[in-house]
Image: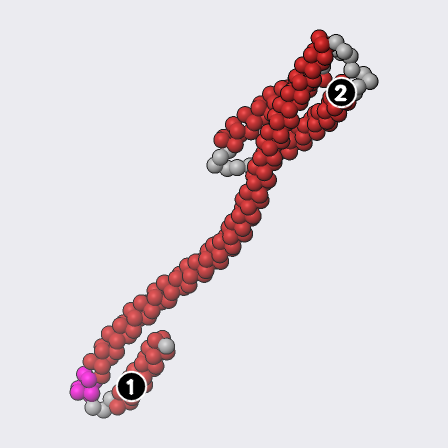
Amino acid sequence: MESEPSAVRLRRKLTELSSEYSTEKQVHTRSKSANSRAPTSDPNGSLRYRRMRRKVDALRTQIDAALHDNYLTTSALNSPTDMIPTRDDDSTLKKKNDEQNLVTSELIQVLNSKQTKIDELEQQLKGIEQQESQWKTKYERECRRREIVQQKLIELEKELQNRQRQSKLLFQLQTDIEQLHLAFNALETENSQLNAELSFFRTNRPQSTRLSSQIDQFRHEIGQTCHESMC
């Protein structure tokens, strides 16, 4: 591994990073499809993103260093003082240099593609967090509405209890009125009997004026009692 060219080593690291990114993307896609009806933010998503971002930054630094080394190597090969007048060595070094340039170019393209994907994931994460904030606001608003409805329900229950008590009192008053009507009817019957007896005494005993006045007084008292009962 110590003799492994820097371009090959960087390509291998980039392949590992690409595989890790693909795995993270599959997990994110499955999580998103499973929670499509109730989107929630992944508590570990930001941590995974930062870890992958650090790896990408480290790999980018290594690529920059490799590019710098490749530039120095190319400059050294093109230097007139260091050129070796051997066709085979020059062809081998040129081929190796071309391979390194090609691999470096591929690495940069792949790295830019991965960076774009990471930026897209970051935007998706921000969208999920914003949607989560909106759901939280909506939930708090619904909780306040629920408290208001509960308070209104308690007030309606109290009013219903008051009306039930009033209904009981009204029923009791109706019962008392019916009893007063019965008592009044009984007094009317008794009054009729007294009137009949009074007529009989007046017809058969004209001298019973004193008894007649007593009956009239008694009738007046009965009428007054009935009037007070009705009031």
Secondary structure under the numbered disc 2 in the rendered image: helix
Callout 2 environment at 10 Å: few (<14), some (14 to 19), or many (20+)? few
Tell me which corner region of the image, top left, top right, bottom left or bottom right, holds residue 122: top right
- Residue 211 versus residue 180 in the image, above or below: below
Spot the residue most to the left. Answer: 203
- 196 and 135: which is toward the camera: 135
Horizontal side of 85 relative to 171 (left or right) equals right
- Residue 77 versus residue 139 in the image, above or below: above
Q: Is residue 73 visible?
A: no
Where is residue 153? Give x, y as percent. 47, 54
Task: Give the residue type that dot 1 points to.
Answer: Asp
201 drawn magenta: yes
Question: Which label number is shown at residue 34?
Answer: none
Tell me which corner region of the image, top left, top right, bottom left or bottom right, holds residue 167: bottom left
- Identify the residue position indicated by label 2 in the image: 78
Task: Give the residue type that dot 2 points to.
Answer: Asn
- Identify the residue position indicated by label 1 in the image: 216
The span picked out in magenta is 199-205
Callout 1 environment at 10 Å: few (<14), some (14 to 19), or many (20+)? some
Gap between marks 1 and 2 measured at Cα? 152 Å
- Residue drawn at point x = 74 percent, y = 24 percent: 71
Where is residue 8? Give x, y as percent. 68, 16
The mark lying in front, picked from 1 and 2, is: 2
Where is residue 185? Give x, y as percent. 26, 72
- Residue 160 versus residue 79 in the image, above or below: below
For the residues labelled 1 and 2, say whether their Cβ atoms are less than 8 Å apart.
no
Mark nearer the N terminus (1 vs 2)? 2
